[in-house]
Image (tube, grey):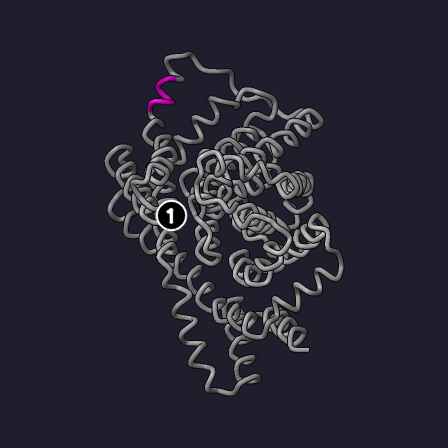
Amino acid sequence: MLVTAILIGVCFVILIGIPIAAALGLVAVATMVWTAGPDLLLIFIQRTYAGTTSFPLLAIPFFVLAGNLMNVGGTTERIFQVAQLCVGRIRGGLAHVNVIGSVIFAGMSGSAVADAAGMGVIEHRAMTKAGYTGRFAATITAVSSTIGPIIPPSIPFVIYGSLANVSVGALFLAGILPGLLMAAALMGVIATVAKHMDLPRGEALPPLPEAMRTVAKAGPALLLPPTILLVIFAGFATPTEAAVVAAGYAFLLGRFVYRELTMGDTVEVLWESARQTAQVMFIIALATPFGWVLIQQQIPNAILTAFLSMSSEPWMILLIINVVLLLLGMFIEGIAIMIIAYPVLLPIITKIGVDPVHFGVILVLNIMIGLVTPPVGLCLYVVAGIAKISIAEITREIWPYVLALIAVLFVITYVPAISLWLPHLLGYGVSR
């Protein structure tokens, strides 16, 4: 009865237009008052405060800042030029460049929205200028941005690691191969579409000296991803401290190396980064007492019993979890899904023997797919705004790429070695 009331309550307040963070907070307050009276509201205040004080969460504002500094400071333009050197000359080349550019940028920002809003502007402009339709360019830009939070660094991995008490370093390692597999799947679909639609080829490879100059100009930017990983895995810094390194490095690149970042730009970037961080932290703050209510009312145990009553087979339970998460991703913002789902799903995956690091990759990939599925796919709205086209136009074209990402999701789900091989290889904080 209580489980049903809570779920209906959350759905109702979201459907009437209340922001997700406020909806979770309201339902948490109502449940506390209903079950134990107003005295329990003291717990609400304590849980709300505690939800934002985890040390790993300090990485969020700095990774957000790093991504915004790179977008404004000229880094993204140079990444795009290097990606164009790699694959730009084949049929549908700029669509492949779009994916490769996202793979490179993924190693810097940790955010799908930063990729869509930053690289997306450059990618969409270049593709439409070369003769691609605005709808096709927007579709590729949206789906390629989902790679961002899978390849490290990753803001969702930082949040999941903090919530579930899982090594963020292990999660970063676990995301590398799945991210590359996503890129390969998207490029496979693009190659098929390019042949069917007779898409244009890119420009021929420039003379070697010119190509080397392009790579040399981008060199300082391309050093950022290995620098972040090196300081983490060599033990020089935690992922949180590495986020500070990334932000500082991005500022130095834009201000003193590429000289495209003015002090006026810096003030705007700081303000925008603060606004984006506040949005994320507000969701985390109010979703934390909601998660506490779920646990206090033993709702995870009830759901665990329900899942196990359907089937005791791990593969079937994982299938059900993926289907539920994909459906939730169509209607609810990703961070909210993560905070709502982890107290419910973590006992389930522990019971069936799934490694929490492996599950972190499954959860985040589900959330990324949700970013490009209507009606609430955030990256769809970002790219539609850039392309000045409707969500419906992108939606009509996006499904082959979404299906490719779902296929990757199921491969990763049922072949855990793809996620766990690198963490096991380096012995980095993986559950045995």
Residue at left offset 46%, top offset 43%: 170
Q: Position of residue 159 (x, y in %)?
A: 45, 55
Residue at left offset 32%, top offset 40%: 235
Quadrant of the frame with the N terminus: bottom right
Q: Position of residue 229 (x, y in %)?
A: 38, 37
Q: Position of residue 79 (x, y in %)?
A: 42, 31
Residue at left offset 52%, top offset 87%: 37
Residue situated in front as seen by the camera: 410 or 376: 410
Per the image, is 215 magenta?
yes
Q: Is residue 134 left or right of residue 267?
A: right
Query: For residue 93, what is the image quadrant?
Result: top right
Name the residue that disc number 1 marks. 63
Q: Is residue 375 visible?
A: no
* Dominant secondary structure (helix, strand or loop) of the stretch shown in magenta: helix
Query: Which residues fall within the magenta stretch?
Result: 212-216
User: Mark 1: which secondary structure?
Assistant: helix
Query: In the orientation shown, which residue stands out farthest toward the right?
Result: 310
Q: Position of residue 150 (x, y in %)?
A: 51, 42
Q: Is residue 400 left or right of residue 357?
A: right
Query: For residue 162, what is the image quadrant?
Result: bottom left
Residue type at tag 1:
Phe
Mark 1: give few (<14), some (14-19) or many (20+) Cα within 10 Å: many
